[in-house]
Structures are given as structure tokens and as C-alpha cells.
Image: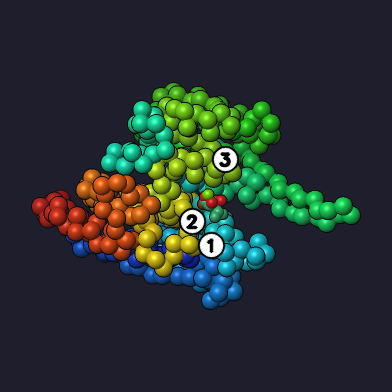
Amino acid sequence: MALEKKKIVLLPGDGIGPEIMRVAVRVLQDCAVEFGHQFEFAEFPFGGSAIDQAGEPLPATTLAACRPADAILLAAIGGPKWDAQPPAKRPESGLLALRKALGLYINLRPIDVRAPLRSLSPLRADRAVDIHIDFVRELAGDIYFGEHRVEVGAHGERATDVAIYTTAEVESVATYAFARAQARKGHLASVDKANVLATSQVWRKTVTRMAADYPGVKVEHLYVDNAAMQLVLAPAQFDVILTSNMFGDILSDLGAALAGSIGLIPSMSIGPGPSLYEPIHGSAPTLAGKDVANPVGTILSAAMMLRESFGLEREARSIEAALDRLFEKGIRTPDIAEPGTTRVGCAEFGEQLCAEMAAVSHQPKRADHGA
Ligand code: IPM
Ligand code: MG
């Protein structure tokens, strides 16, 4: 059965965003031809470039286009040009507003140390093995979405940031994490700061209660400071890590560093409507326009989109396998180049990846596609 045409909204954003998006779209287009699918792409302004064009980081037309889409692919936003703006006029506010508007409450960030890139990890060789961690980060609550206030007093300013979690919010994201752990190695580490924070106490109590419904999942609770240490000392112990919005932001960057470059990590944000896929890195303004950015996080995000939103497992695998073969051959963007490897630019990396995908023909498999 042929797949219906899929409508994909593209948000290239700022900095290196447009360059890495171009490569990811090229890979998706080749994939569509190879496997006989139809993807319809529509690009919209978002982030700093949208501030420049429309005066706000999330224009109403962009949000309106995202709502009925089958999936959304975002590259990167932000840059020094907008850093001095008040919070509401910053690119980051657009991202938070988009997450909120689409109800994206789950953020999945897989940290996989890919075998051909193991030597990139800053960890000692014996620790950089078997690292396959799925971070499940809560994305719609916590200190990110509570009140942020600065009051000016006689002796300086007084700032407040409010963190809130309800039982229902914890249950929603934890349900996903338990299911994910069940489908993987059956190990769930819930990370909080229950020795200090009230939100963490609700978090831990809820996860502990839910654990009874998942006898096949081994649940462990860690304080966030210990989790940071364990991630560096013994990362192979982790399978699925469930954590709050704030802790997930911090720990997933640490996780990305273990994989050798933040440029390699994709993510998926899930809500009731279309899911949003984006690399976890930023817009790297200093690299923009130089054709040196690493498109792999965006390409892997696109592969994740094929798998998770469209059920196209084989197509996702063909992209991931071609990437690994390219890495084996030593084709690398500058951020992951090592002695003896061939340094290529962002666009050239995309070309070589498409050639690598084409080299392994999927034609025979296409014949059984309708079966
Ligand atoms: C991320 C980013 C965002 C976050 C910023 C840009 C608001 O760091 O997606 O991890 O903190 O969630
Ligand atoms: Mg972050």
C-alpha cells in the first residue's frame, strides 16, 4: 500500500539552520524517489529570521501551517543579533511558544555513540562503549513555563522563576518513558532533585506509584547531581532516562558531548498533533555561511521523522546505515574530523551521503512495497 503524500513543514531558522536543512531535505527527496513516496515540503519563517521579516519569532502563519502538517522539521534558531532583545522578542521565545501551542510535552533525545565515531568521545575508550541512552525530557512544564519576574527594589533587582509540576503532567510523560523502556532494555532511570524540590517530590511519588503497573521495567531514582556524575563515569548503565524540562535540557547536552559532538544528536517532540523533529544543537552563528556545519543531527532527525511519524522503518534505516558507512569511510565534517579522515563541507557531506544511499539499491525491496 502506497503511503499517502506527507506534508512536512520546514523551519530552517537562523545561523547554520538553512544550510543543514538544505542537506536534510535533499536526503529526504532522494529517499522518497528511492522508496516511491511523496513528501510535500513547505518552508516557513521562524526564530530570528521571522523577527526580521515579521516582527515576531513565531508568526501566526507559521503556527497555522504547523498545526495540520504531518510532521515539522526544524533546523536551528537564535543568534547574537537578537540577544539584546527583550525575552518576548527573542528567537528562543518562538521555540517555547511553538512547543506550548502544539502541546509538545514529550521530548525524546537519543544519545547513541555510533561505532565508527567511538574515538570522538571524550570518555576513556573502555567507558565509551554500549552507550545507547534515550532521554525522555518533559517539555511543556517546570520552571520553563512558570512565571518569570524581575522586580526592581531599592538595593537592586529581585528575580523569581516559578517551577510547577502536577501529578497529571508527570503521569503523561512518564507513561511514554515506561513504554519506551519496555520496548528497549527494560530499565528506566528517573532523575529529579527530590531531596530539595517540591516539584521533584511529586515527580518521584508519581513515578514510584506508576512503576507497579510496569513489572517488566526496572525503575531507579537518581538525584540530578548524581545522574550527571554517573553519565560520565558509567554511561552504559543507562537505558531510558526520564527527567524534567530543566534537568533534561542540561543532561541531554552532557549526553551529546559523550557522543563526540552535539552536531550528531537528533530529537523528537511529541504532542497530540504533529511531532516536531530537530537537532539538539543551536544555530552556531560563527559557523554560518561557511559550509562547515554538521548536518548529521538534522539528517538523523529526518530519519526519526520517517520512523516515528510515518512508520517508515526501512527508509529510516537506509539513511542511518548510509551515514555509518560514510563515517566508516572517514568522510567527516570539520567538527568530527580526526587524523586520517577526509574533511568535507556540509553540502559535500550531503552529496556523498546521497551517493552512499544510492549505492545500496533498494529496488528489489520496492517491488514488495505494496505487499
Ligand atoms: C533545547 C534548547 C532550548 C531549551 C532553548 C533554545 C530554549 O536549549 O532545545 O535544548 O532550553 O529547551
Ligand atoms: Mg538545550
Q: Secondary structure at mark 1?
A: loop
The three-letter amino acid code for the residue at tag 2 is Gly
In 3D space, how far apart are the residues under numbered discs 3 and 1 (Cα atoms)? Answer: 21 Å
Figure check: 264 above or below 288: above
Residue at the (24%, 62%) spot, across then down: 351
* Figure label count: 3
> Where does residue 320 sit, x and y in percent of width and height?
27, 48
Q: Secondary structure at mark 3?
A: helix
Q: Between disc 3 and disc 1, whose residue precedes?
A: 1
The three-letter amino acid code for the residue at tag 1 is Gly
Which quadrant of the view contains residue 58?
A: bottom right
Residue lying at the far front in this picture: please name it.
Answer: 339
Q: Residues within 10 Å of mark 3 (few under 14, many from 20)?
A: many
- Asked if one can make out residue 289 in the rendered structure from this viewpoint, the answer is yes
Q: Between disc 1 and disc 2, whose residue precedes?
A: 1
Nearer-the-camera pick, 166 or 96: 96
Q: Which numbered mark, 3 or 1, is in the foreground of this view?
A: 1
Q: Secondary structure at mark 2?
A: loop
Q: Quadrant of the N terminus?
A: bottom left
Q: In the rendered image, which residue does mark 1 sit on?
A: 78
Q: Between disc 2 and disc 3, whose residue precedes?
A: 3
Q: For disc 1, does the CB lie below 8 Å from ligand 1?
A: yes
The three-letter amino acid code for the residue at tag 3 is Phe
Residue lying at the far bottom in this picture: please name it.
Answer: 53
In 3D space, how far apart are the residues under numbered discs 1 and 2 (Cα atoms)? Answer: 7 Å
Q: In the rendered image, which residue does mark 3 sit on?
A: 247
Q: Are marks 1 and 2 in contact (CB under 8 Å)?
A: yes
Give the number of the disc on residue 98: none
In 3D space, how far apart are the residues under numbered discs 2 and 3 (Cα atoms)? Answer: 18 Å
Q: Is residue 138 left or right of residue 40?
A: right
Q: In the rendered image, which residue does mark 2 sit on?
A: 282
> Where does residue 52 sit, x and y in percent of width and height?
55, 74
